[in-house]
Image (tube, grey):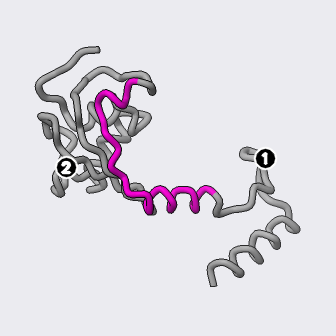
Amino acid sequence: MTESKSVRTDKFLWAVRLFKTRTQAANACRMGRVLIDNNKVKPSKYLEGNEIIVLRRPPVTFTYRITGLTENRVGAKLVDNYLEDLTPAGEKIKLEMKRMEMPDGRRKGSGRPTKKERRVIDRWKEFFFL
């Protein structure tokens, strides 16, 4: 567990498992989806600690407070040593609603829906979204 005085934003977001790859973290910063103390940041900005990170992943906006810094990727159980989750309950409900959005009638990777399945999907979308 290596603690640093300052760490690049993209490296920290990857290290605390908010993104699967450092490239994804850097791209999110460039797209303006990462705010630190309500300011858009570049991936190369150095974090000093005790800052608020707002991570926008539509439709949910996550909020975290940095409690420690690390450059090395940590295990999932150790993430709590570096981040405090400040995300409001309303945002977490949005995440659950997104997961329940589509019926689980098809398995992932099973190919395109059949004509019958497509009609069911269309009816479902029409009912909930129009």
Give the image location of residue 54, x and y in percent: 28, 52
Image quarter in which the C terminus is found:
bottom right
Q: Amino acid at mark 1?
A: Ser
Q: Relative to residue 64, is residue 121 drawn left or right? A: right
For disc 1, the neighbor class at 10 Å (few under 14, some 14 to 19, many from 20) is: few
**Residue 36 badge:** 2
Residue depicted at 29% across the width and 41% down the height: 26
For residue 2, which quarter of the picture? top left
For residue 69, which quarter of the picture? top left
Residue highlighted by disc 1? 110
Q: Nearer the viewer, mark 1 or mark 2?
A: 2
Q: Residue furthest right?
A: 116
Q: Choose the circle earlier in sequence order: 1 or 2.
A: 2
Image quarter in which the N terminus is found:
top left
Give the image location of residue 110, x and y in percent: 78, 47
The Cα atoms of the two marked residues, 1 and 2, are separated by 40 Å
39 to 27, vertically: above or below: below
Q: Amino acid at mark 2?
A: Ile
Residues in magenta, as a range: 78-99
For residue 114, which quarter of the picture? bottom right
Q: Residue furthest front?
A: 89
Q: Relative to residue 44, is residue 72 drawn left or right? A: right
For disc 2, the neighbor class at 10 Å (few under 14, some 14 to 19, many from 20) is: some
Find out whether residue 87 is within the magenta segment.
yes
Element type at mark 1: loop
Residue depicted at 37% across the width and 22% down the height: 74
Q: Disc 1, disc 2: CB below 8 Å?
A: no
Residue depicted at 81% across the width and 71% down the height: 120
